[in-house]
Image (spheres, coloured by chain):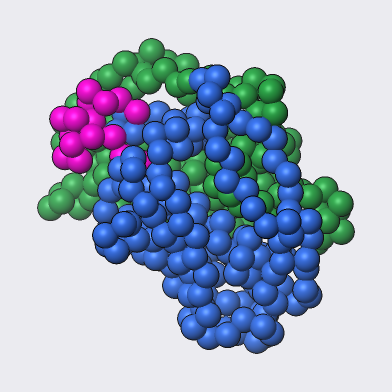
Chain colours: A blue, B green
Amino acid sequence: MADTIENRTYAEIQLGEAASISRTVSEQDIQLFAALTGDINPAHLDHDYAASSMFGGVIAHGMFGGAMFSTVLGTILPGPGTIYLGQTMRFTRPVKPGDRLTATVSCREKYDDKQRVIFDCVCVNQDGKAVIKGEAEVIAPSDKVCRPAATLPSVALGGVPYPVRA
Amino acid sequence: MADTIENRTYAEIQLGEAASISRTVSEQDIQLFAALTGDINPAHLDHDYAASSMFGGVIAHGMFGGAMFSTVLGTILPGPGTIYLGQTMRFTRPVKPGDRLTATVSCREKYDDKQRVIFDCVCVNQDGKAVIKGEAEVIAPSDKVCRPAATLPSVALGGVPYPVRA
């Protein structure tokens, strides 16, 4: 974890500039997402049900991968000061526990009038296959921001420590 | 919490049919979302920074409200057996701790060939103002599913019990 969080201003961001984060999805991640959102669809939690589904086992919530785009946009590119205007997502493949995901946002368009930036978004698995594709629209920050990184409370799931990412 | 989770099949879903969930957003929700996703943008966590921002205080992650659509789709309408194909979102207003959100999905279009359904999605605050608008595309289930509702592990945040929603 970095000690500080710094942004890229609208002026600094270049067309084609990209940023990524990667993580391996665990069953703990899926359970915590369900606990946070209330999305207890059995495809994510019920092993007996999921084994007989078209996916052959439990899968992660689509929006869990989608949130990785928001994390890149909010913490790296552009980072602090970004105003999130919109996000589109197409869920193209299932994500299973143990899959290694990499979410990347790439600057495709810049509009000087309101400092709007359009990012292509893709989340791929360990085989390089896209699991989510989409685009994000943000207002990029005018001013440089560099802040101490937030310290988050510890999290426990069923009494077991959960590895907080930040 | 219901004891079972049951779906609405493609055949049962009517044009105009809608379903909603409501929740009041807490600072615990925001911190847990940050811990789960790694999105530690200071707009969500850093009170000193956020007080001087255009929003005048910390705000929830946009994708937190977005996940409410996924929860309605995954647990109520259509519920189990749904294949999530895509989601669009426009973030139209900030969400602050204490805001009461209601996310609603409404069936707008049905396509018999692949049992695709398009839902209008809107998330409003306690004043009835939209904070997110968008649409979802799913494949609705063919078969009726009724399963015991999943029991989730307990969650603690900084040693304090977190009210698991499911």
Depth order, front residue of B60/A147: A147
Q: Is residue A37 magenta?
A: no
Left or right position of A66 against A93: right
**Looking at the picture, does residue B151 appear above or below residue A31?**
above
Q: Nearer the viewer, residue A75 or B130?
A: A75
Identify whether B110 is placed above or below A52: below
Residue A108 picture location, percent across and down? 48, 81
User: Horizontal and vertical percent for residue B27?
Assistant: 72, 36
- Residue farthest along the left direction in this orientation: B113
Residue B25 makes an appearance in the image: no
Q: Is residue A69 above or below residue B79?
A: below
| Res. B116 in view | yes
Q: Position of residue A90 (x, y in %)?
A: 34, 59
Estimate the x, y position of residue B159 in percent, counting from the top left: 69, 23
Which residue ends up furthest to the top in the rendered image? B3
Res B91 → quadrant? bottom right
Q: Is residue A108 left or right of residue A146?
A: left
Towards the viewer: A50 or A87: A50
- In magenta, the rendered stretch is A45-60
Residue at left offset 46%, top offset 57%: A22
Give the main secondary structure of the magenta stretch. loop
> Is residue B41 or residue A111 the one in the foreground?
B41
Residue occupying image coordinates x 74% and y 49%: A150
Residue A103: which quarter of the image? bottom left
Q: Quadrant of residue B9?
A: top left
> Which residue sits at x=60%, y=69%?
A77
Residue occupying image coordinates x 55% and y 61%:
A72
